[in-house]
Amino acid sequence: MARAAQSQSVTVDGHTLRLTNLDKVLYPETGTTKGDVLAYYAEVGPVMLPHLWQRPATRKRWPDGVGEHDGKPPTVFFAKNLAAGTPDWVRRFTISHRDHDNDYPVVDDLATLTWIAQLAGLEIHVPQWRFDADGRPQEPDRLVLDLDPGEGVTLVEAAEVARWARDILRDVGLDPVPVTSGSKGLHLYAPLDGSQTPDQATAVARELARALEADHPDRVISSMRRSDRDGKVFVDWSQNNGAKTTVAPYSLRGRPQPWVAAPRTWAELDDPDLAQLTYLEVLERVARDGDLLAPLAPDPSRLTQPDRDRLSTYRSMRDATKTPEPVPAAPPAPPQTDGDPIFVIQEHHARALHWDFRLEHDGVLVSWAVPKSPPTDPKSNRLAVQTEDHPMEYATFEGGIPRGEYGGGAVTIWDGGTFRLHKWREGKEVIVTVQGRPDGGLGGGPRTFALIHTGRGGGKQERNWLMHLMETEPEHVEAGSRSPGALHGGTLPEPFDKLRTGSVEGPRRGQRPSTTDDQEDPSDFPAEVAPMLATLDDGKHFGPEEGWAFEMKWDGVRAVAYLAGGRVRLLSRKGRDESAAYPDVVAPLSRLDVVDAVLDGEIVVTDASGRPDFGLLQNRINLSRPADVERAAQTWPAQLMIFDVLELDGESLLARPYADRREILEGLGLDALGERVHVPPVFHGDLEAARDISRQLRLEGVVAKRTDSVYAPGRRGRTWLKIKNFLTQEVVVAGWRPGQGGRSGTFGSLLMGIPGPDGLHYVGRVGSGFDGATLTDVQRRLDERAATTTSLVDVPREDARDAHWVEPDLVGEVTYAELTGPGRMRHPVWRGLRPDKDAAEVVWERP
């Protein structure tokens, strides 16, 4: 692909990460790129990680870099809570605040550090305390003073105050280490023995600051009043508070230069030319001198304690003195690098009989409990509930777990062997071909299983997956997946070393000319493309499924996103600009590092269970006042499901086959933009599995697409087919009948039609599915469209006797049970307005 210089996949500590936008400049003054940042953290990680170990990490992200953009300050995000989509291998602990809980990552390995840097997390801030193995905050293990020069004060003068503070600290038995902060001033770190509370440490720091101020009132201030700091060094003692954080040693800073919070020697602080250090200077010093802050690092033996590995949950649920199961005391063995990975299926007669399906991955057995045994028929799918990771030794375990212990009951091996990996999307999708034993429960011979995550809404449902037996083995490894060997590697590949110098081979992407006009000129964006449409099919006579890809049919409104130089236009199917209506979708798209692009997708709003809900989406449609849009975005946040890419960096992809476009789409890194933009999974060559998943998710159906098909703008054809789980239909509202009783002030039912060769064909009345707000809104629109005659050509006299007619340009959507003989809908239910559709485009959606 043409993005070779912009993205690549690496395996770090056994975890595969996709690194994107590597050539993006994050520090314009020096030309330092995201690739340079990633390489810096990879190289400095061994000395940085001990100072981060077991501390909750707050991240400051600069997705567009630290420089100004169009005269505006850079965008920066302060991230505390972990967002949805965080890899499950990122270790985390929960901190309860007064009105909410936050899940904080602990940056204990290079993979997590790399993941943060991939998200443009330049700064990492941590408190002065650590979690214990169970996630409980311990007492602080260090005291910190932040020496902040006021206006007119130099770093050299701050160093003098640091020497005065050193003398006082040494008098009370504390030996501090100086760190130039990477910003303006200095930090002093002194080790504590863990016997003091945060309040006590804060009190010590406050008294020290006051003593310095008393001795040097013209040079030092300890007051929090900013107005008094000019010409003085502010000694900030408050960062010892248990709720406060300090930028971590060796962290980059979001300053114009790529400076680092760098440990220094006291001799360096005597240098009259003392200055902040860049990341390149820090790397040279670490190579030469090691970690100058090593006296404050924890004992190395603590860094390998068992609670840091993926088996901590497994161990916490078992007592090795009471169960015959393997309960290793040590962390998992390093992932193997040779031979095929193994699988095992164990029949488990616990409180409820089930089968445990386990796959070797990252040095452990990733496990699912399958209540009704793995499927042996492609037409029969199974629920699979993900459980805790198990040790590799469990692959040969058989025996009886005592009653009363976790999982009590008999365990026997039902089948086992090796597998080939086709796809592993962490927390989303796994496809493997297993080769079991000749006498195993799978009947010998290869079997290809797909596991698709279906859990939504948190709680126990979050662990639910669907297990499906595929009829044929995939012919190739899908885009975004890795071979078993790549997944099992535990070291950085050689190309990662080239990131620092930006020398990864491949063409650089072009630069789009900038504009000085503050108003967005549509001509600056790629040319508009009419969305390709799908033809309804009943799925009963689909034919061979080879060569087809199946996507979920999302219950929302179609949207095509046009990207150009960090700007976004979001157009509806009718070509209406919806950018201002969905700022929660536009904002993340603006961070995608492309020259220009055209992306096809669907805007949805989900309910509490995570299911797209067209009724909730109605609350976002037709809003125009910014205050209304902002409130609605908070209450009903939108998501954009992107399923196609039509243009990229000036190259039209319309004539490229679907399979190529899909591969390009998956390589764009859209899932890294946050929880508002997604590239949903695609199911290859298996219609029933896709339909089963859509039913479990209570979606509208699936869309089948020929993998060799081109994109045909504005046209329907047989290369895109929509197969629905229930009957829906777009309709044109042609009139209304007055309501009775509680609806006496509004309509009782709407008269619906569908355009045909001889006019607007009457298809029935709909009177259910309306809430109070919808009744009021639709009635207002009806009154605005009042007409004197009907546009319907065959409406029955009994339905028309008290009807009020309207101009037929209002489009809605209904569900219905079936059609009667004359083509009328039985039991229609209103779903909502479709302002994204033109009345003239409405067609019968009958297979």
Image (cartoon, helix red, strand yellow):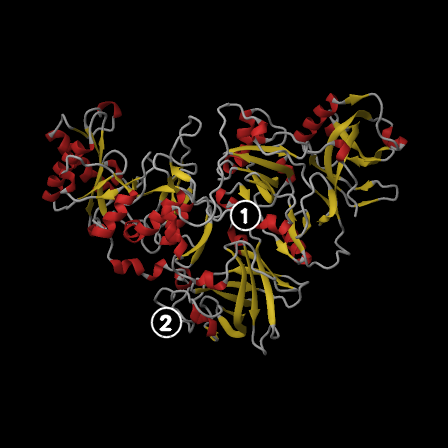
Splitting the image into 4 quarters, where does residue 58 fall? top left
* Residue appearing at x 73%, y 59% in the figure: 544
**Percent of width and height locating residue 487:** 46, 60
Label count reads 2
Three-letter amino acid code at disc 2?
Thr
- Of tags 1 and 2, the one toward the viewer is 1
Q: Secondary structure at mark 1?
A: loop
- Disc 1 marks a residue whose amino acid type is Gly
> Which x, y percent locates residue 363?
42, 64
Where is residue 222? Give x, y as percent: 20, 30
Q: Is residue 550 above or below residue 524?
A: below
Q: Could you say where residue 481 lies in the image, as x and y percent from the top left?
A: 52, 57
Q: Tell me if 7 is positioned left or right of 744 in this view.
A: left
Drawn side of residue 769 relative to residue 793, left or right: left
Q: Residues within 10 Å of mark 1 (few under 14, many from 20)?
A: few
* Residue ID for mark 2: 321
Q: Nearer the viewer, residue 110 or 191?
A: 110
Query: Which residue is nearer to you in this view: 746 or 721?
Result: 721
Q: CA distance from mark 1 to mark 2?
A: 37 Å
Q: Which residue is mark 1?
A: 457
